[in-house]
Amino acid sequence: MNKADEPRIVLAPMEGVIDAPMRAFLTSIGGYHRCVTEFIRVTDVLLPERVFLRLCPELATGGETQSGVPVYCQLLGSDPVAMAANARRAAALGTPGIDLNFGCPARTVNNSMGGSVLLQYPDRLGNIVRAVRDAVPAGLPVTAKIRLGYENHALLPEIVENIRQAGASELAIHARTKFDGYKPPAWWSSVKPVMYQGTSSTYINGEIWTVADSCLALQASGCEHLMLGRGALASPDLARRIQSARRGYDLAPMPWSVVASHVERQFLHTDCSSPRHIGNRTKQWLAYLKRAYSQADELFSMIRKLHDVPGITQAFAEHRRVVDNQCIRHCQV
């Protein structure tokens, strides 16, 4: 397979989980073509620059991770004028692209007319996309992320057509409705009838946990490309292994010892700042990692009830000794 024929893989936005340090780690492993920030909530005002820089610190380094992977600013809101103004500001700050969030299922977001609730109003989606497209330079990509619908799939063709006609260059579709939430399965085949045509690209998202899942998702949906979210957290090297498999060779999964060292580094660098929430992000990540690594379950059990830096740091040290001893015994066999 030529590189031009390989699926592009986007690291999905996940509010409260995939932040700048996580983006830096996952893109350092390889396989990703771009990332999307956690959503920047837009109401009816022009947000100050500090809001964009807080959620997308990569703006200070050319809009890329340390590995050179572009990071698009994602906006979430329902007011076309305000969305356009904030997209213009993000563009001025140097974002390499604008992504629009029409897929968030969170009740608090939906209750304020943001995210997936807008899937009930295809015309409004088109108005928002068009306003943003017109507000930013012609060469700056404007992309969107949606779900199959709000309660059902009935409006999906109209949703996609409105977004396409409004000028979005790419569309990521999470193959579930808002009412589905994150319950399996993902309805990949429901995307096929509305897949983007011509110069537009479509990314399939949802329940892609393994290399095999990626193949099935692409085949069932008819999409050319992938967006990974929870699967990337469970298997940090998933994107790289997908790309390798498409080239005809398999890579062994990243060893737990390597993953564990990054989990510990994330805790020390990003998860110790708020006394009320010490360890929460680390525990959340371990909950995903348990799907691919049994050792993550062991580490999670060690820190589950801990809420202080010294205690969690000691637990990491104890776990590291166990892992090192296992590696030594394995090498001696």
Image (cartoon, grey):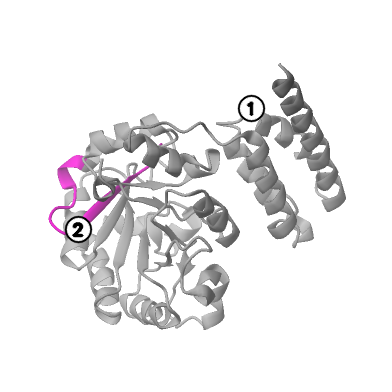
- The quarter holding residue 89 reads bottom left
Residue identified by numbered label 2: 200
Q: Residue at x 36, y 81 (%)?
A: 88
Q: Is residue 314 magenta?
A: no
Residue 259 pos. (x, y %): 63, 41
**Residue 187 visible (yes or no):** no
Q: Amino acid at mark 2?
A: Ser
Q: Residue at x 72, y 47 (%)?
A: 264
Residue 223 pos. (x, y %): 24, 44
Q: Residue furthest top?
A: 333
Residue 249 pos. (x, y %): 38, 32
Q: Residues within 10 Å of mark 1 (few under 14, many from 20)?
A: few
Left-right relation of 147 to 58: left
Instruction: Please say if 252 is above or below 17.
Output: above
**Residue 119 visible (yes or no):** yes
Residue identified by numbered label 1: 294
Secondary structure category for the residue under label 2: loop
Secondary structure category for the residue under label 1: helix
Query: What range is drawn magenta here?
Result: 192-207
The first of marks 2 and 1 along the sequence is 2
Q: Residue at x 40, y 63 (%)?
A: 114
Q: Quadrant of the image for the C terminus?
A: top right
Q: Residue furthest front?
A: 332
Q: CA distance from mark 2 to mark 1?
A: 40 Å
Residue 230 is marked as: none
- The quarter holding residue 291 reads top right
